[in-house]
Amino acid sequence: GIFFGLNSQHTRFDLYRAILEGVGFSILQNFEILRSISNKDNIPDYLRVSGGGAENNHLNQIKSDILGKKVITTKVFESGLLGGAILAMMGLKIYSFNEAVKKMVHIDRIFQPNMEKHHHYYSCLFPIYKKLYQNNIELFKELGEI
């Protein structure tokens, strides 16, 4: 990644926020790819997160603001294990997928997007993020080879 546009007025918190915004922008970039493949403009409707990053409320709110979508955390930290349990229930024909999810996946918190920030701030920054990536992709490759 790159810190771009820094000056002497920026603080440690600005750098921290920039890292979180980079995560959010990379998710948005993946959403764009998903939309182009599916030919659907409004998917997904929300982002459900779990694991270590899901415990970071700042990250979840930034993701929500960047995506313009709800970010939902679940009460289960180890979602991989939960997924295995859901598949086992399906394999044993105890539950269908939808039934298992309803019984086993529980929402902890919902982060609502700040649509003003989404439209007037992040929508302006995202094209710059994409240009930075495209303009530096060869340098990223070279760096990865060191």
Image: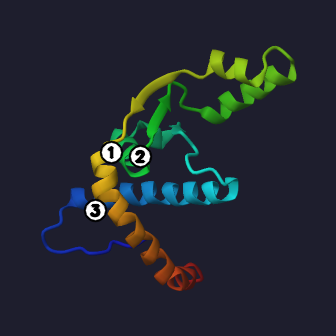
- The Cα–Cα distance between marks 3 and 2, rounded to whole angstroms, is 22 Å
Residue hosting label 1? 115
User: Is residue 135 left or right of 40 when viewed as pictured?
Assistant: left
Q: Residue at x 43, y 54 (%)?
A: 24
**Relative to residue 50, is residue 99 depicted above or below?**
above
Name which residue type carries label 1.
Met
Give percent across and percent down for residue 117: 28, 50
Circle 2 — which element?
A: loop
Q: Do the residues under discs 2 and 1 have CB atoms within 8 angstroms?
A: yes
Give percent across and percent down for residue 95: 78, 16
Circle 1 — which element?
A: helix
The C terminus, quarter of image: bottom right
Q: Do the residues under discs 3 and 2 have CB atoms within 8 angstroms?
A: no
Name which residue type carries label 3.
Leu
User: What is the count of numbered marks?
Assistant: 3
Mark closest to the chain's N terminus, 3 or 2? 3
Which quarter of the picture shows residue 33?
bottom right
Residue hosting label 3? 15
**Relative to residue 112, is residue 12 depicted above or below?**
below
- The Cα–Cα distance between marks 3 and 1, rounded to whole angstroms, is 23 Å
Mark 3 Cα within 10 Å, few/some/many (few <14, many 20+)?
few
- The Cα–Cα distance between marks 2 and 1, rounded to whole angstroms, is 6 Å
Which quarter of the picture shows residue 96?
top right
Give percent across and percent down for residue 86: 73, 25
Give percent across and percent down for residue 62: 36, 48
Name which residue type carries label 2.
Gly
- Front: mark 3 or 2: 2
Q: Which mark is residue 68?
A: 2
